[in-house]
Image (tube, grey):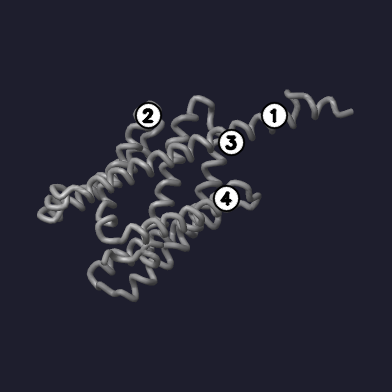
Amino acid sequence: MNTYYDSPTGRYGQQDALAQRVSLIMKRVYFKMFLAMIVSGLTAWYMASSVAVMTFFANHTWMSWVIFGAELILVMSISGGINRMSSGTATLLFYLFAIVNGAMLFPIIYAYSGVSIAKTFFITAGVFGAMSVYGYFTNRDLSRMGSILIMCLFGLIIVSLVNIFLHSSTLQWIISAVGVLIFIGLTAWDTQQVKRMAATMPQEYTSKMATLGALTLYLDFINLFLFLLNFFGGSRD
């Protein structure tokens, strides 16, 4: 009676094989993301500890905009052109982005105390981990929530640009609070999206998909960390 369901080629066997494949891909996603965070952290630490680098950026403030532009170009190149490039090229560009992002983030090490950075990092890791687990295991379709969060994110970007000129501390606090909520939700939604791609992508796209998934979750983590740092970060004495 149960021969069909117990057979490795039966429905249950196929479901188990798919689950194992998805699990393997997700492990690669998180591993690449973890390595990228290490690359960014080491880059930021090196630049913050170099007097020459600090002096250069202090005298050439426009470099921050150059780095920001490079980040956008790399993200769009990876996201929009990943199907046309090799998996090795996609991975190389991803880690190049991690280096560039570390260069963008290095003032944080200079501005905030090491204790507050570490505390915020672990808080971010806990929140990110909990929401990513939820996104992975929930049976609820988060697509509608994701669409709403994307629209909210665009609105947040516009308000943030306006506040560059207003310099409102109250508005900045609101932006940070809303940013935390948005990226908490996006972490769950993006995890579910990456899991779905892992289940449907052809085998030959596995490595590229892992890179794209790592980039997506890396951005969620970094942005969540930056917004939380506004609440938990303490300046150097």
What is the C-alpha distance between the residues marked 3 and 1? 14 Å
- Residue 40's x, y, as percent? 33, 44
Q: Is residue 20 above or below residue 137?
A: above
Mark 1 highlights which residue?
Answer: 14
Q: Earlier in the sequence, mark 2 or mark 3?
A: 3
Helix, strand or loop status at disc 1 = helix
Amino acid type at mark 2: Arg
Mark 3 highlights which residue?
Answer: 23
Amino acid type at mark 3: Ser
What is the C-alpha distance between the residues marked 4 and 1? 23 Å
Do residues under tags 4 and 1 come within 8 Å of each other at their CB atoms?
no
For label 3, count other residues whose C-alpha is less than 10 Å away and answer few (under 14), some (14-19) or many (20+).
Answer: some
Amino acid type at mark 1: Gln
Q: Earlier in the sequence, mark 4 or mark 1?
A: 1
Q: Is residue 157 above or below residue 98?
A: below
Helix, strand or loop status at disc 2 = helix
What is the C-alpha distance between the residues marked 1 and 2? 30 Å
Direction from residue 47 to residue 124 in the image, left or right: right
Mark 2 highlights which residue?
Answer: 84
What is the C-alpha distance between the residues marked 2 and 3? 26 Å
Do residues under tags 2 and 3 come within 8 Å of each other at their CB atoms?
no
> Which image quarter: residue 90?
top left
Q: Earlier in the sequence, mark 4 or mark 2?
A: 2
Q: Quadrant of the C terminus?
A: bottom left
Instruction: Tell which of 235 and 62 is nearer to you.
Output: 235
Mark 4 highlights which residue?
Answer: 135
Q: Earlier in the sequence, mark 1 or mark 2?
A: 1
What is the C-alpha distance between the residues marked 3 and 4? 14 Å
Residue at (38% x, 44% y) in the render: 37
